[in-house]
Structures are given as structure tokens and as C-alpha cells.
Amino acid sequence: MLKEMKSDIYHLMHPKMAFFLTSIAKDGKPNVMACAWATPVSEEPPIVVVCVSKESYTVELIRQTKEFVINIPTKKLLKALWICGKTSGRDTDKFKKAGLKYSKAKSVKSPVIDECIGHIECKLWKAVDAGECYAFFGKVISAYADDKYMKKGLWSQKAEIPLHLGGSRIVYFK
Ligand SMILES: Cc1cc2nc3c(=O)[nH]c(=O)nc-3n(C[C@H](O)[C@H](O)[C@H](O)COP(=O)(O)O)c2cc1C
């Protein structure tokens, strides 16, 4: 029997990789949020899109400084992911709260998270007003991954990347 989805229609498009989205304020203070609504949209040139709520602090920062970094975690960072997904950088230093360390990125000012196994550094190409979110299209400036977790250019099963099912449910890529 087919069940009509009245709300949470987006659950039909999950699971989606859950990752850390880092950004930076004009004064150089970085922020991090959990994010799952994202996808590559072009290979040549490489462009990705991340969808960020208008209520978030991250939206403000990306609109100001026009850049962001996608940081891909493993299962070990699940607790940190929830902390970054449930609190706002407006009033909390989430790196500290979640126990995450960060370093300078290669090509943008937003930082990369040390504990993550993949990073995609982006400069904002276009922002589309999309309902309660902005869809930020980012031109990929630099992308790199820990080869320990890769096999022939693909994530290996040992990466155990968290996949968001919706709500508070996570499954793992195995
Ligand atoms: C697993 C997970 C995935 C999330 N995905 C998104 C997302 O794709 N877009 C979004 O705007 N918020 C998403 N959130 C919620 C934000 O992380 C949350 O609103 C956060 O507090 C925003 O932080 P900020 O105010 O510091 O930017 C997600 C939360 C979790 C736990």
C-alpha cells in the first residue's frame, strides 16, 4: 500500500551523507554546523550545492564572506555532529563544545576540521533563495581526502561515513 507523505517529504530522499560545514566571519572567527542537504551539481567545472536554513548563523557567514568548506566525518564524530547540529555559533564556540580541532584550509579562509577524512573547499558562485533555505552553489577550489579511507578513488567501507536518515536517525555507509 502506498502511504501519502504529508510532511517530511524530504525523508524520501534520505539517507544523505551528514558532514560538517565550516564558514568564517569577517573578523576571522570560524563556525561549524552539521549539514546533510548537499550534492555535486557539475563535474566540469566542479560545483557543489549546500542548502542552509535562513535561521542559521552559517547562512549569515556564507553570505558575508562567500565561501565554505565541506568536512566529511567518520562514525567517531557522531556526538560532535549532533552538538554542531543542535546549537548555534551565534552564542556557542562549537569547536570547543564538540571537541573539534581545526587548521588553516589550502585555498579559503574557512577552516578544515582536523578529525575529518575529506575536505571540499568552495568559493560561493551563486546563492539561490529557496524557501526556508539558501541553496549555496560553491565552485570547488580544492578537494582532498585521507587515502587510508579510499580505494580506487572511492570511499572504502572502513570510512563508515554517517548517513542521515532524518530526525535523530543515522545509519552508516558500510
Ligand atoms: C545530521 C544533521 C543534518 C543537518 N542538516 C542540515 C542541513 O542540511 N541544512 C540546514 O540548514 N541545517 C541542517 N541541520 C541543522 C543545523 O546543523 C542547525 O540548525 C545548526 O544549529 C545551525 O548552526 P549555526 O546557527 O551555527 O549555523 C542538520 C542537523 C543535523 C543534526
Image (spheres, rainbow, N blue to C red):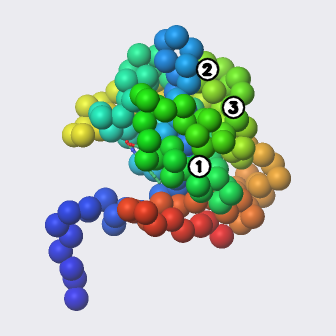
Q: Residue at x 29, y 33 (%)?
A: 54
Give the amino acid type for the residue marked by disc 2 in the picture.
Val
Q: Is mark 3 within 8 Å of ligand 1?
A: no
Q: Position of residue 1 (x, y in %)?
A: 22, 88
Q: Is residue 161 above or below residue 68?
A: below
Q: Name the one closer to the observer, 131 or 60.
A: 60
Dot 2 or dot 1: first in sequence order is 1
Find out whether the residues at labels 3 and 1 contact each other: C-beta distance under 8 Å.
no
- Between the C-alphas of marks 2 and 1, the distance is 23 Å
- The correct choice, above or below, for 106 with respect to 39 in the image is above
| Element assignment for label 2 | loop
Of the residues under marks 3 and 2, which one precedes in the sequence? 3
The residue located at (82%, 53%) in the rendering is 148
Which mark is drawn over residue 102? Answer: 3
> Is disc 1 placed on a helix, strand or loop?
helix
Label 2 CB, ligand 1: below 8 Å? no
- Can you identify the residue that label 2 sits on? 108
**Residue 59: quarter of image:** top left
Position of residue 89 measured from the top left corner of the image (x, y, whole percent): 46, 31
Q: Position of residue 167 (x, y in %)?
A: 38, 62
From the image, tell me which residue sits under label 1. 80
Q: Is residue 53 visible?
A: yes
Most foreground residue, 29 or 114 = 29
